[in-house]
Amino acid sequence: MGTCCSQQQGGEIQNLEYRQFEPIVMPTLVPQQINFEEHREEIVKIQSSMRKKKAKNVAAQIREEADKERPGDTWFQSKEPKHIEQNVLITQNKLGKFKFDKKLPQEFNECRFFVAHEHKRNQGNIYVGQWLSRLRHGRGKQYFADGSIYEGYWKFDQANGRGRIIHSNGNAYEGDWKNNMSNGYGVFYDFDGSRYEGEWLQDQKHGQGKEILVDGQEYEGSFFQGKKQGQGRVKFPNGDIYTGQLENDSITGFGELKFQDGRNYKGQFKDFKMHGKGHFIWPDGREYKGYYCFDLKHGEGEFKWADGTIYKGEFRDGKQHGKGILIDKHGVQNESYWSEGKEKRLKSEA
């Protein structure tokens, strides 16, 4: 193969020359066997580099998907917060790890799981869990800026279903939730050791429940809008037991109080005190039937001593006061007047 070279002047071709090129000879490649053992370290480094590059690509893809799904007022976080409040840690150790259902509820199967996000408007609030249409939905864990932690189920950006919150002060609630509020059945743990287990409505104890205080006092019965109300049973630390009505967290209404020393009162109460008509019995045989005013016999009543003597008449501030009849164990009646527990005038009758 060759080529032509020429110079052109005035449209004429002059000095036409023909040159012959030497053929191009390709070098012969001789196959060589590579010793992988000698280059193992280099090979491992190359493979590791390729895996890291692939992981970065996957992470970038996940980040891109997360940015499409996450709410607009959050940003992407790569890690959960490391600092946990001391009281929260103490309560976590007491209660143990929160247990999700073994099988993810079917309604959450299509929800994506993303790493933590932090609310721009409330910096420090971090969420790790499932999302749906830019809303927290499914299993998730929320770290609040004040140090509190919620772990449980979400529906459409609110705590719904079963979950547990541990407040920064160490108090905790575990149970049913509805629209970010305790609702259904659950247990409240006070950091001081007190505990309530029972029914809830809109963040308040409501329905039937049991409360145990740190001093040992126990209440089991009805609650209404966060307070003891209705029928219930109170066991006091000293062993006394009350069964009956309560109102606004107070023993008020009709009930029975059994003292640990054998005394017994059945009747009306007001603000933890005997108030109204009632019947009091002592273990030595004494007995009173009549009216009380804040733990004191007051008004019409009948008092019986252990030997059978009976007083029927008026009482004031816990003492016989006014007109009354004294009946001895033989049935002899004496009409008399009393003043602060002392007789003033006596008239005998056969």
Image (cartoon, rainbow, N blue to C red):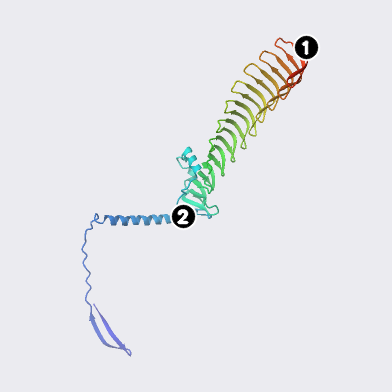
The reply, left or right, for residue 274 in relation to residue 55 is right
Residue 51 vs 295, above or below: the answer is: below
Q: Amino acid at mark 1?
A: Ser
- Residue 134 location (% of width, % of height): 52, 52
The reply, left or right, for residue 242 in relation to residue 349 is left
Quadrant of res 27: bottom left
- Residue 138 location (% of width, % of height): 50, 46
- Residue 8 location (% of width, % of height): 31, 87
Name the quarter where the N terminus is drawn: bottom left
Q: Amino acid at mark 2?
A: Glu
Q: Say few, some or many: other residues with alpha carbon within 10 Å of mark 1 (under 14 / 14 to 19 / 20 or more).
A: few
Q: Are marks 2 and 1 in contact (CB under 8 Å)?
A: no
Q: Identify the residue at image location x=75%, y=12%.
A: 333
Residue 69 vs 21, above or below: the answer is: above
Query: Farthest residue toward the bottom?
Result: 10
- The residue singled out by tag 2 in the image is 65
Q: Which mark is residue 348?
A: 1
